[in-house]
Amino acid sequence: MPTCCIVDAFPAFLEFWPTIRHKIIDEQIDAWATIYMARWPELLAMQKACYAEDGEDWRQIAREMVFPHLAGRLAGMEEAHGHLLTLCEPIYARSQRILGFGSDMVAVIYAGIGCGAGWVTTYQGMPAILFGLENVAEEGWTGSEVLTGLIAHEIGHVAHHHWRQQRSLPNGSGSWWQLYTEGFAQRCEHVILEGDSWHMARRMEGWHDWCQANEGWLAAEFLRAVDGGESLRPFFGSWYDIQGQSQTGYYLGHELIRELESSMEIREIALLDGGDPRLRASLLKLAEGST
C-alpha cells in the first residue's frame, strides 16, 4: 500500500524563532537560511530557485512580504501545523481510494519564504507536497476544514503528475498549462471530498457567487491576457486580485475541466498537453455561454 510520510521541519523553527525574533529583519533572514534551513538544504535550494526562475530576489521577498509578519502569524502556523499532522495521511489514503492511483508521497511541513501554502514537486526523489506554514497562516487557512480542502487540492496535483508519468508525458508550462493543471487539481479536490469545498474561498465572502456571475467575463479576460502576453498573477496569486477578487483562476480552471468532462473521462483529461486546442475551445465556450 502506497504511503504518505511526513517531514516535519516546524518544531525546529519553534526552537529557532525565539533566538532571532528580536533581531533586525536582515539578520533574521540570514539566520533562517544558515541555521534553521541548514538541516534541509534541498528545501532551501528549492525555495531560492522558486524565485530565481521568476527573476525575483528571494531576500527582498522575504524582507518585504514574509518576515515582518511572522510574529503575528505564529499562532496560526502552530494551529495549522497540528491539523496537517493529523490530516495528511488519512486524506491521502482516501484520495488513492477515490481517484484510483497508487504512489508514495512525502509531505514537508516547514516555515518558509512565501513560495506557497501548498506546492507539489519532488523531494528526496519522491513526489512531494511542501506546506509553507507562513503562507497557510497568511491566507487564514488554519482550521481543519479548509486544510482538508488544501490537502485534497495538492493531492490532485500529485495524482495528475502520477498519471502523466505512467504514460511518460512531461508536465508543461505556460499560461494554458497553469489554468489547466490548477483547474484539474481543483476538480480533484471536489471529487476527493465529494463536494464543492473551494478551499481558497474560505476568507472571501461571496467569492464563488461573484465568480459564477462573472464567469463569461473572466473567461474572456483570461483569453485577452494570454493573447496579450500579460502576467496571470491577477488570476492565481494570493497577493493580487481582479476587481477585488483573488485566485479567480482556480474557479475558471475548474469550470474548464468540467466543460471537458462533458466528453472525456478525468484520466483522459489528465493526459492533455498545455497546447491542446480543446483547452482554448472550452474556454471560448465558457466566454460565449455567459455573454
Image: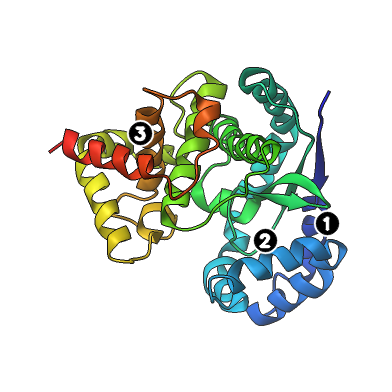
Q: Quadrant of the N terminus?
A: top right
State the residue in front, 94 or 122.
Answer: 122
Q: Mark 2 points at which residue?
A: 112
Q: Which residue lies furthest to the right in this view?
A: 39
Earlier-in-chain disc, 3 versus 1 = 1
Q: On the picture, is 251 further left or further right than 265?
A: left
Which label sits on residue 255? Answer: 3
Q: Which residue is drawn at 36% across and 36% down?
A: 256
Look at the picture and state if 206 lies above or below 175.
above
Quadrant housing residue 90: top right
Residue drawn at (57%, 50%), measured in percent from left and top? 137
Q: What element carries label 2?
A: loop
Does the residue at mark 2 contact the one at mark 1 (Cβ under 8 Å)?
A: no
- Residue that label 1 marks: 12
Q: Report x, y in % for residue 126.
A: 79, 46
Element at label 3: helix
Q: How far apart are marks 3 and 1 (CA)?
A: 41 Å
Q: Is mark 1 on a helix, strand or loop?
A: helix
For this rendering, which residue is in front, 64 or 258? Answer: 258
Amino acid under disc 2: Gly
Q: Picture coordinates of residue 98 (x, y %)?
A: 62, 18
Distance in Å between CA atoms under marks 3 and 2? 32 Å
Residue at point 54%, 42% (across, down): 141
Give the image location of residue 12, x and y in percent.
83, 56
